[in-house]
Image (cartoon, rainbow, N blue to C red):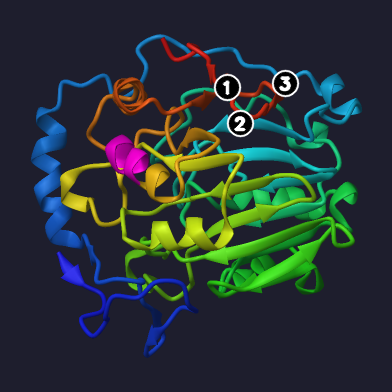
Amino acid sequence: MVDEASNQDMTMLRKARRSGQKFLNPVLTSVGEWSTILKVLPLYLKSKEEKVPRKPLGPFRTDVEVYRQPPASGLRVTWMGHSSLLVEIDGTNVLIDPVWDERASPVQWAGPKRFFPAPLSLDHLPRIDVVLVSHDHYDHLGEATIRKLSRMDSMRQTRWVTSLGVGAILQRFGVARAQISELDWTESVTVAEGALEITAVPARHFSGRKMGNRFETLWSAFVLKGAAHKVYFGADSGWWEGFAEIGAAYGPFDLTMLEIGAFHELWADIHMGPDGAARAFAALGGTGLMMPIHWGLFDLALHGWRQPTERLLEIAAEQEILLWMPEPGRPTEVVRETELRSDWWR
């Protein structure tokens, strides 16, 4: 384990800092290196967990006819699995962390493979006003997906919003520079003729598409603020004390999306798991609905693939958290204080 920044003090909401060419986390954070991999390998070989579904999941299919009518509530979400989502918020359509690739990997012949196909082809997406990319990891930024989207005629006027430094990757995959807005933490951009404000906020994670370029681009969580709704997209983050200040500054949120999968004590600083997600939800204000993301599609950890959601259900019962857990690919309206618990994963 190495500390990527030993000179940090405790900070809350402010722009990201750097040490040389590398971005720093908002608080002191340890990120695993080769030594962590050496520790994980024997655990992986001994694991008897069902890390990949033994039986095929789905098939999941998105009814595209639903998109012909705007959501009556003003907020509708289609969860494509993991952290890929289509969010329809107060008239603006936002595609978040799109990964339609077969694998979350530098190559498509090896690496974590999807548990189920994408419920909707990219060609059948409704109008997309904004593509939001939180950071450059393979399970959040799929090269084949970005290349396909960048070539689609329907995407010529789409805005791309991302964290500092990630724009160069998007350009390399075909997105026009003029379409890209890069944000530092606490910076905002308005899109869709002012109908939606997107703000980047700090997260405790890291970046890099290979071991040698970690921290060279920024990683962020985001707040989506429409005319009537607010959504918090947590992307990837370990627990940190800044959640409370984010909630105070930008909340309350109608829907709070927090990661629950790919966690382990060896990398607890950068992935918080279901217990940390519940703690973060409370710190963010504990209002509205909590949506678990970053689970159910790729094998990225040592735990069983169902374990994150099973544990979250236990916590929700103990803490009276209202969960919002839709079936993959199903466009589902978000109604205030109305819980949703699909059992597709059972």
Amino acid bearing label 3: Thr
Amino acid bearing label 1: Pro
Q: Is residue 130 above or below residue 82?
A: below
Q: Is residue 178 magenta?
A: no
The magenta stretch is 273-279
Residue 63 is left or right of residue 171, and the answer is right
Residue under circle 1?
326
Residue under circle 3?
62
Q: Is residue 278 magenta?
A: yes
Q: Residues within 10 Å of mark 1 (few under 14, many from 20)?
A: many
**Residue 228 visible, this angle:** yes
- Identified at 36% across, 41% down, the residue is 277
Residue 75 is left or right of residue 275, and the answer is right
**Residue 343 drawn at (x, y percent):** 48, 11
Residue under circle 2?
79
Amino acid bearing label 2: Trp
Q: Between disc 3 and disc 1, whose residue precedes? A: 3
Spatial CA span between label 3 and label 1:
12 Å
- Identified at 12% across, 59% down, the residue is 35
Q: Nearer the viewer, mark 3 or mark 1?
A: 1
